[in-house]
Structures are given as C-alpha cells and as structure tokens.
Amino acid sequence: GSELGLISHSRGASMATLRLPLVRYPSVLFPGSAVTLSSSPLAAAISAALRYDSRIAVLGPVGRIAVELRLVCDQHLSDKPSGVVHGLTGDRRRLHSLAEGGEGGASISNFEPVDDDPMLSPAREERVHDEAQRARDLLERGVEQRAFSLEPSHLDDELGLGPLCDPRCHPLWQSDESPPAEAAALSFWLAGRLPLATSLRASCL
C-alpha cells in the first residue's frame, strides 16, 4: 500500500481548545491551499472573523475535521471579482463542541488541534521520503510533457460548478503553485487537485 497516503492519518487530540466561527461548506478543503470561495455561505462567519484574527473554521459536508481558513484582507484589490472571498487554509481542527449562542448569525464552535505524530520507524520514514520524491518526479515529468495539468479543484468537479474566477486572481496563488517538499503537505496538495468524490476527500483529512 501507499506510505504517502497514510502519512496524514495519524491523529492525536490535545485538550486545548480553540474557539472559531464555523462554516459548513459543500466541499472539503485541505491545509496549505490558497482558495477562492463564494462569499454567500460565508457571510455571517466573515463578519464574526474580524473578532477572531480573520480566521474561521470550514467544515465539509461530512465528518468532524475542519480546516482553519485565514481570510485575506483583499477588499481593496481592484481585480477581485465580486461575490468571492480569498483565503489561505491552515491547520486541521477537530470539532469539539458548539459554543453557546452565536455572533451576528455566525455559529461559534470549540475546536481541538489535530496533531500528526506518526512515530515512523527509520525504515518506514525512508520509504515515505522515497515515495514522496517519486511522486514529485512524476508530477514534474507529466507537467513538462503536458500529460496533465493539476489545477486546484475545490468545487468545480465535485459540485458541477464552473470556476468562480481565474485562480491567478488570488493574491497568494503563486505560493500554492508548486508541490511542497514535506510528505504530508504533498498528500494534501495532491488531494486538493485530483477529482475525488466528497467522501474520499473527507477521508484524506
């Protein structure tokens, strides 16, 4: 089986909790991505995010693992399309409990961090490293030969929607263009670009 596919699945919950506005979104997002989303389902959380360091937690349609989304303060960008919001996804968060009450229509919830500590043996760590390197080599070769193009796929294939805007409209799009070096980050980077079904996306978290 694939070592690379397993590296992100070891979970250990900490007792420390974090309170953030919660959004249930129709697609699964992955850590470390520059994303552009429709602002309509995020409106209440965006307003509340100003009191939470411009951060919200985005939870997919299934499961209890959310991804922290830091909103990009781009309201003054002249080329930002209307009806969208730019963000940068961060750490995964496990939904712990719903906080009492809300703020401006936003649901405020308590989250626990999701820690990746696979405790790999030296031999398995070497296999993971080798597999990640092979994946990067195949990606580079495929792009050079124009065999495929790995564009971010957060909504298009999954929900049958057209692109919200050109990915290059995102002010941080270049930071998300190249495959990351670290194995777990590479797993998430690939998962965010492959045409996976919702349930499979959720299992990757």
Image: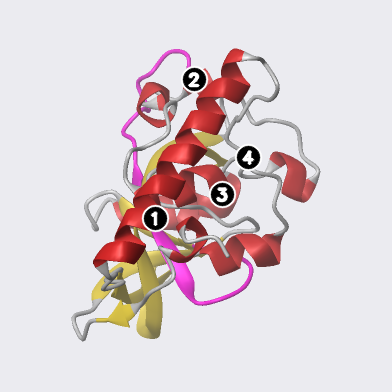
Question: Mark 4: which secondary structure?
Answer: loop
Q: Nearer the viewer, mark 1 or mark 2?
A: 1
Disc 2 marks a residue whose amino acid type is: Cys
- Marks 1 and 2, Cα distance to the nearest angstrom? 34 Å
Could you tell which of marks 2 and 3 lies nearer the N-terminus? 2
Question: Mark 2: which secondary structure?
Answer: helix
Picture coordinates of residue 42, whole percent (x, y): 51, 52
Disc 4 marks a residue whose amino acid type is: Ser
Q: Nearer the viewer, mark 4 or mark 1?
A: 1
Name, please, the residue furthest toward the left: 16
Nearest to the observer: residue 13 or residue 183: 183
Q: Report the disc number at residue 153.
A: 4
Determine the image quadrant of residue 14.
Answer: bottom left
Assess whether residue 53 is covered by the magenta stretch.
Answer: no
Assess whether residue 63 is covered by the magenta stretch.
Answer: yes
Q: Nearer the viewer, mark 3 or mark 1?
A: 1
Question: Mark 3: which secondary structure?
Answer: helix
Q: Is residue 84 visible?
A: yes
Could you tell which of marks 3 and 1 lies nearer the N-terminus? 1
Could you tell which of marks 3 and 4 lies nearer the N-terminus? 4
Query: Which residue is painted at 36% across and 69% down in the image?
Result: 93
Query: Which residue is painted at 47% across and 52% down in the image?
Result: 30
Relative to 194, 79 lies left or right: left
Query: Which residue is painted at 24% across and 72% down in the image?
Result: 18
Q: Report the disc number at residue 191.
A: 3
* Residue designated by label 2: 169
- Marks 3 and 1, Cα distance to the nearest angstrom? 17 Å
Could you tell which of marks 1 and 2 lies nearer the N-terminus? 1
Query: Which residue is painted at 26% across and 73% down in the image?
Result: 119
- Marks 4 and 2, Cα distance to the nearest angstrom? 15 Å
The magenta segment is: 59-79
